[in-house]
Amino acid sequence: MALVRNNSSNGREPVLSPRSLTSPRGLTSPRPLSVQPTPEPVRPLANFPPSIWADRFISFSLDNSQLEAYANALEEPKEAVKSLITDTTIDANTKLKLIYSVHRLGLSYLYPDEIDAELNKLFEKIDLQYYEQVDLYTIAVQFQVFRHHGYKISSDVFKKFKDSTTGTFTDDVTKDVKGMLSLYESAHLRLHGEDILDEALAFTEAHLKKIVTTLEGDLARQVNQVLKRPFHTGMPMVEARLYFITHEEDFSSHESVVKLAKVHFNYLQLQQKEELRLVSQWWKDMQFQQSVPYIRDRVPEIYLWILGLYFEPYYSRARIIATKITLFLVVLDDTYDAYATIDEIRSITDAINRWEISAIDQLPEYIKPFYRILLNEYDDLEKEYSKDGRAFSVHASKQAFQEIARGYLEEAEWLHNGYVATFPEYMKNGLITSAYNVISKSALVGMGAIADEEALAWYETHPKILKASELISRLQDDVMTFQFERKRGQSATGVDAYIKEYNVSEEVAIKELMKMIENAWKDINEGCLKPTEVSVALLTPILNLARMIDVVYKFDDGFTFPGKTLKDYITLLFVSPPPSLEN
């Protein structure tokens, strides 16, 4: 902050207040000083589009008796589906199709032990000879079931669909649309070295695009849906709702599955609308729209993002905490990127790293309310989680927040100095500024006993699966936002750094970054296979954060301009009524 200095050299005391000055010599009042107004600094305003939701979700009123009624209504079909999963008289094929549907409908978290026990038995009995006699659709469904639950079934099960002479997939595959669709879904679960699945992905995608306009009914909807976003890279709750709408023939023979799915959707919508109301009301009460009006006002979008990490009812508190912290990130990011001067950025970074209320005096007026709220919220969390010895998770989130502030400062210094970082330099800092570390650590805060100090220590080792998800978060964002950032004259993205580093065209740079993203997905798929390094409950948010990056940034910058994908998702989950409980 610039200080006002008196530059006179005549030895007199500086004139502080002409009106209160009385002259000991009886002199007349001095002439008023001519004060030049301080020019407003040039700010890198982005003029982000306003929220498309305004206060819409604040008006929701939760009917607790209705929520309780849904909770009670879940019990009967839940037990009936459990009996189906564990039924020893059901043949393997029917059992695997049932588990597939339960998973696709977002219900498998209700039966982790039962599903694992059944898949263990079935996996031990696998005979590759059996797959020589089975159709493509059945093989692909079973492949997905096993892979989604961590079992490394061999991709050789698809070999019989390749022509031994040409090495390409046979014409018979193209005649089986449902089988081809499932093979396309299976290919997204591929690992490094699984060339057959790399080929299957390219082959099925090309053929599905070719025939999609010739299809009708549910099959047409299924193909359109999967070409837009395969299940494996989608948001679990949205994918569950879409599966219920377009794949009814997969599970309609099991009445208890249909009933459970319907009640479950109704229960979750009530609970999640209440969570969205709480964070929306908090945001309004904190008056961020008044103190920092230049930021992206995206409360429903951020809540949706966090919901994508974990939708299970028992993570309600975790979602609220992680949403608030991620909203803090938006304020910080947009302040550095779209408002603050370089001197202000330095002051804000220093204050965040000092993390004490006395540091507020060094901050520009507009950011003081944010700083006060930030410290208060973390202080409240620390008190709350100190009671059961879990303050370590709050500290980890805080340290990640301080780290990202330093990362944002680094980017701002590059921009200020007109410096385009080398690609390794960019990636080292870019993985920090992707916000991944803050979001993933903050997601742990409210998860309970599963997110213990041992789990946090594993996070701190920066395992391969975490690095992969982080890389997707950084590069998918860059590929979709670099043109917008360039127009605004903002700091270079990964695309610009790659072009500079390797002296290639924009087209080649994007192609290479997309290859890196594809390889990172293979690392994630590998990290989810048994035996896993940590609990699946800890791996799932890592996988889901990569999925949400794909959702938000696959086609455009869906966060800055949420009028397409995110608007559709928010409408589906919080505005449109869930499936009716009436038959």
Image (tube, rainbow, N blue to C red):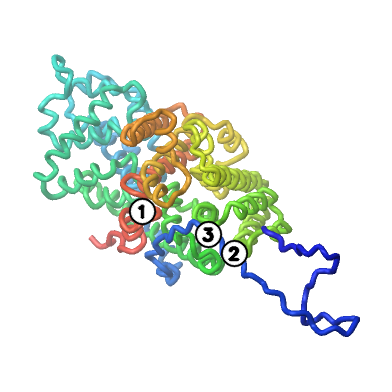
Q: Earlier in the sequence, mark 3 or mark 2?
A: 3
Q: Amino acid at mark 3?
A: Val
Alpha-carbon neighbours of circle 1 within 10 Å: few (<14), some, or many (≥20)? few
Q: Earlier in the sequence, mark 2 or mark 1?
A: 1
Label 3 or label 2, whichever lies nearer to me, is 3
Residue 29 visible to the viewer: yes
Q: Report the residue marked by disc 3.
A: 42
Residue 396, by quadrant, is top right
Q: Front-most of 311 and 484?
A: 484
Alpha-carbon neighbours of circle 2 within 10 Å: few (<14), some, or many (≥20)? few
Q: Earlier in the sequence, mark 3 or mark 1?
A: 3
Q: Amino acid at mark 1?
A: Glu
Q: Could you tell me how far apart the alpha carbons at marks 3 and 2 are, in whole angstroms?
A: 15 Å
Alpha-carbon neighbours of circle 3 within 10 Å: few (<14), some, or many (≥20)? few
Q: Front-most of 443 and 501?
A: 501
Residue 283 visible to the viewer: no
Q: Report the residue marked by disc 2.
A: 366
The x, y position of residue 264, in whole percent, is 36, 55
Q: Quadrant of the N terminus?
A: bottom right
Q: Are marks 3 and 1 in contact (CB under 8 Å)?
A: no
Assign a secondary structure to mark 3: loop
Identify the residue shown where x is 48% and y is 60%: 295
The residue sitting at the front extreme is: 10
Identify the residue shown where x is 47% and y is 59%: 45
